[in-house]
């Protein structure tokens, strides 16, 4: 019979490289930078690591879109000189970083290894083009055989506007407030990519990418790495007093029906609903809005944050606009969302994002947020959410981190 996973695994060290257009750093440079940051944080050396997991997509341009090829554990074993230790490569779309951490945590909980390393890494700027290219999907009366990521989320935005009775002006204004918040949060975060403070009017009047999404509604193309070091809870105090525990984990993969259904509802993500229910049950969370202190959710586009928060059950469906206008998702609000700047402004190097979001939660729970003006008071529970894929064929990972009871 399955046992509860809650509180069995601790994070004892984390590190994060600078996110951005890191032209002066290769993938190996960022891996080394973030890993040695984490080792120093944990107070250990590389020889203490028993095994490692690396989360990366390894995308490259092939002239017709994006493909992934030939990525192995050597991608971190070589730069880190891990000397024949086991390294596992994990890839699960934009959920890659969180899923790599999830798999490593299971190995620690099973007592296969004592101390493990998790590396999330992506070098997107060197692909030579922006975005992820065209996404190939089955024939569909709306998509007609191909779709970009901004195009897909633009469809979600217009459907959301229609379903909840928002005019184009009202809908875009709601999304502009999300983007303004993201950039403001990132402006105070030294490791973030897009640190420019923007106004609602800038967002409203920005060049369109895929209407209603404009330039400031879309995340940038970013390089970055983030690293976590895990051990079992009973060993954590050997390394530090302010360790952070993994309270719950959830993973869900959709069956793919959204791509062939004309009645698919773009305004809710079933995969997020299922993954969050699994994580909440594992963590013993009954009322997530009241029990979770901060959220790092998958906001690759401004509309993504809206749908993610509602799908996670942190806001009633269709009421995001009221929350946003009331400031509920700001640092001083009821449920702070993406205090780091989120994928939107901190950056979204795909394989690194889940670990990087965990890094923000980890530092906030310890009371060590970079730039004290960003520090939440008395935060004890945080949630990380990642999602990727196509309508009805999404993959979603949710992780809940918290301080010892």
Image (tube, grey):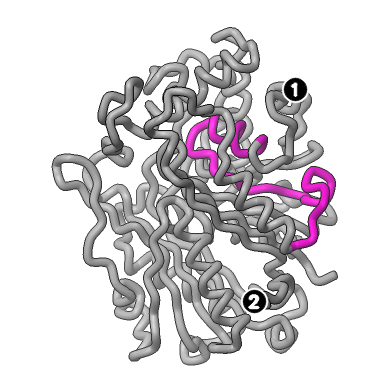
Q: In percent of the image, x 24 and y 46: which residue is there? A: 66
Q: Where's residue 375, x and y in %?
A: 74, 51
Residue 296 belongs to the span the image colors magenta: yes
Query: How far is mark 1 from mark 2, CA to CA?
Result: 38 Å
In this rendering, the answer to whether 121 lies above or below 331 is below
Callout 2: few (<14), some (14-19), or many (20+) C-alpha neighbours within 10 Å? many
Q: Secondary structure at mark 2?
A: strand
Residues 113 and 256: in front is: 256
Q: Is residue 363 visible?
A: no
Q: Which residues are magenta?
A: 283-310
Q: Position of residue 243 (x, y in %)?
A: 72, 74
**Total number of numbered discs in the rendering:** 2
Foreground mark, 1 or 2, reads: 1
Residue found at x 35% / y 21%? 142
Task: Tell me the quadrant of the picture where the C terminus can be found.
Answer: bottom right
In this view of the protein, which residue sits in the foreground, 260 or 75? 260
Q: Secondary structure at mark 1?
A: helix
Quadrant that contains the N terminus? bottom right
The residue drawn where x is 24% and y is 40% is 129
Between 155 and 244, which is closer to the camera in this rendering? 155
114 falls in the magenta region: no
Relative to 232, say whether 158 is above or below.
above
Report which residue position mark 2 lands on: 12
Q: Residue furthest left?
A: 63
Q: For mark 1, does the 10 Å Cα neighbourhood hold few (<14), some (14 to 19), or many (20 or more) residues?
A: few
């Amino acid at each position: 019979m399955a046992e509860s996973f809650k509180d069995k695994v601790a994070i004892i060290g984390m590190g994060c490289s600078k996110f951005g257009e890191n032209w002066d750093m290769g993938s190996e440079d960022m891996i080394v930078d973030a890993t040695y940051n984490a080792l120093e944080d944990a107070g250990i050396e590389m020889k203490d690591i028993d095994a490692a997991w690396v989360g990366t997509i390894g995308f490259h341009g092939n002239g017709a879109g994006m493909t992934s090829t030939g990525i192995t554990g050597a991608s971190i074993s070589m730069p880190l000189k891990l000397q024949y230790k086991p390294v596992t490569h994990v890839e699960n779309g934009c959920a890659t970083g969180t899923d790599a951490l999830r798999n490593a945590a299971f190995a620690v909980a099973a007592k296969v290894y004592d101390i493990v390393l998790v590396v999330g890494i992506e070098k997107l700027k060197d692909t030579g083009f922006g975005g992820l290219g065209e996404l190939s999907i089955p024939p569909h009366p709306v998509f007609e055989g191909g779709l970009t990521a901004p195009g897909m989320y633009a469809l979600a935005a217009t459907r959301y506007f229609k379903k909840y009775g928002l005019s184009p002006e009202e809908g875009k204004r709601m999304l502009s407030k999300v983007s303004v918040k993201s950039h403001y949060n990132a402006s105070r975060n030294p490791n973030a990519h897009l640190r420019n403070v923007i106004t609602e009017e800038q967002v409203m009047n920005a060049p369109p990418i895929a209407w209603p999404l404009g330039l400031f509604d879309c995340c940038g193309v970013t390089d970055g790495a983030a690293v976590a070091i895990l051990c079992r809870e009973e060993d954590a105090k050997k390394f530090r007093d302010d360790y952070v525990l993994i309270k719950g984990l959830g993973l869900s993969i959709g069956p793919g029906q959204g791509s062939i259904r004309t009645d698919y509802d773009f305004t809710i993500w079933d995969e997020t609903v299922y993954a969050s229910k699994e994580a909440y049950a594992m963590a013993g969370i009954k009322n997530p809005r009241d029990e979770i202190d901060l959220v790092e959710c998958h906001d690759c586009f401004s509309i993504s944050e809206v749908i993610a928060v509602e799908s996670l059950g942190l806001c009633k469906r269709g009421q995001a606009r009221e929350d946003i206008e009331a400031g509920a998702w700001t640092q001083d609000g009821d449920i702070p969302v993406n205090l780091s700047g989120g994928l939107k402004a901190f950056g979204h190097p795909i394989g690194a994002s889940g670990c990087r979001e965990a890094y923000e939660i980890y530092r906030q729970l310890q009371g060590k947020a970079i730039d004290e003006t960003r520090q939440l008071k008395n935060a004890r529970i945080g949630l990380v959410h990642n999602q990727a894929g196509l309508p009805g064929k999404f993959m979603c990972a949710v992780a809940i981190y918290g301080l010892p009871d």
